[in-house]
Amino acid sequence: CEVHLYEQARTVGRKFLVAGEGGLNITNRVEGEEMLGQYAPKDRMRPILAAFGPAELRAWLAELGVPTFIGSSGRVFPEKGIKPAEVLKAIVDRLTAKGVQLHVQHTFVGFDAVARPLVERNGQQVVIEAENYLFGLGGASWAKTGSTGDWTAYFQALGVRTIPFAASNCGVELVMPEALRVHVGKPLKNIRITAGDRSVRGEATLTEHGLEGNAVYPVVPAIREALARGQEATLIIDLKPDLTEAELERRLAGAAWKERMATVKLDRVQVALLKAFTPMHRFIDGSTLISDVKQLRVPVRALRPIDEAISTVGGIPWDELNDDLSLKQYPRIFVAGEMVDWDAPTGGFLLQGCFSTGRLAASAIQHALTKGRSTT
């Protein structure tokens, strides 16, 4: 195949590099139903991930000279010493070695009358003539990388329905009492957060606006749904997930009022959070301390804006797509990555989903061409 890749920036993979700023978590070791449970909609993502999952991605990276290792949390990273820029270079080198022609500083600006893509460079528009097209235009987070979501207007002009983008894997906003603000930037370690039917153990950090962190991001979908329905959105926080209520009761037996927090080993940040979201009379009374420690109810008033989100949901809905990620109305046009309305938490699942959707769409194009069906 003759393959041309059009990129609006001066170099390819800017968002890939941003994703690696804190360590390039490229996938996760979990497999099967445990892995699928991280994705929504699970049934639509199932065949996509089955065709190219974590094992296949790691094998492909190894072929490129990028060995990976599994961290203690199950997250998969390039071997120590391999920088994100080196991973990106290995990918780009493979493309150019296979004859892919890269065209940078070409911005997608819509379609012509027969649904051929238009790109613009130096003020001049060019029609891209090809048998098939694969779009990977991203969602709407990290706008500094060019991922603005502006492309939705061009697809809508074709008659393709899109869903407005919303923040995912983002912080949550709380009503922050002044006594809690002195702890901004400090972590809440080894906690469990529950919202809806999702419960996650991990860590969170107090921010100027509320909470963020790996224990928060996976429950954002439940919070987003509750807020969209106009319902109360609440985080249930277990400050001591390693201790049962019975064990806490045993430890508190006979403890003086002033010794309660030290007895159950709550640190200053945990105590501040507990006081902030427990009515004063209840906190002083202490009779419900155990249930408050295990099920602290923290109301959420909003999610942080898309500009701060790690990822987004929205874009092209599944009912506009064939199983091979081509548009039902324009089967020569394929889409992949965050353009499609799917969701997953951090931990390697986002990049895995992007690789997997791209692989499925490209395989479908290759299959159509080898079968001689250039119209699919």
Image (spheres, grey):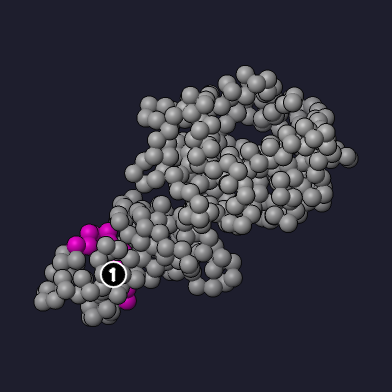
- Is residue 136 visible in the rendered image? The answer is yes
**Left or right for 218, reference 100:** left
Q: Quadrant of residue 212?
A: bottom left
> Which residue, as the protein is rendered here, is positioned at the far front?
371
> For mark 1, what is the residue?
293
Q: Amino acid at mark 1?
A: Val
The answer to whether 269 is drawn above or below residue 288 in the figure is above
Dominant secondary structure of the magenta stretch?
Answer: helix
**Residue 278 at x, y = what percent?**
32, 73
Residue located 59% across and 66% down the image: 228
Range drawn in magenta:
265-279
Q: Position of residue 121 (x, y in %)?
A: 74, 26
Q: Is residue 96 left or right of residue 277?
A: right
Q: Which residue is at a point 54% across and 73% down the rendered structure image?
A: 231
Question: Which is nearer the eye, 293 or 71?
Answer: 71
Position in image of residue 64 (x %, y %):
52, 25
In the rendering, at what x and y percent does residue 211 appear? 40, 57
